[in-house]
Image (spheres, rainbow, N blue to C red):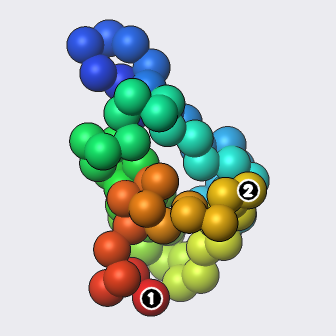
Amino acid sequence: MAETDSVVVGYIIGTVHESDEVYVHPDHRSDNSGHLMVDKLLQTAERKSINRSIVYSASKQWQKIIGLRKAWF
């Protein structure tokens, strides 16, 4: 979950193995909230020695929406 000023602006539903949904409110999609959530998810997976995580998205622009950089791929 991502918060700004104690307001939830995004969330991830799933596990470190498989995330069914990543959502960031449209007003916060340019502030790296999505990137920070996915980064935290991947850090947790790495600490648990998980070397593969799946993140599903319903948007064709999912990389832009959650702020992922091309370096992740």
Residue at horizontal 53 percent and vertical 84 percent from the top: 51
Image quadrant in which you'd find residue 73: bottom left
Residue 16 percent across, percent down from the top left: 60, 60
Whole-Å distance between the Cαs marked 2 and 1?
19 Å
Give the number of the disc on residue 73: 1
Residue 31 percent across, percent down from the top left: 26, 42
Image quadrant in which you'd find residue 54: bottom right
Q: Between disc 2 and disc 1, whose residue precedes?
A: 2
Kind of residue sitting beneath label 1: Phe
Question: Quick one: SS at disc 2?
Answer: loop
Kind of residue sitting beneath label 2: Ala
Between 52 and 65, the one lying in front of the other is 65
Question: Quick one: SS at disc 1?
Answer: loop
Report which residue position mark 2 lands on.
58
Residue 27 percent across, percent down from the top left: 39, 28
Residue at horizontal 56 percent and vertical 63 percent from the top: 61
Q: Is residue 33 above or below residue 69?
A: above
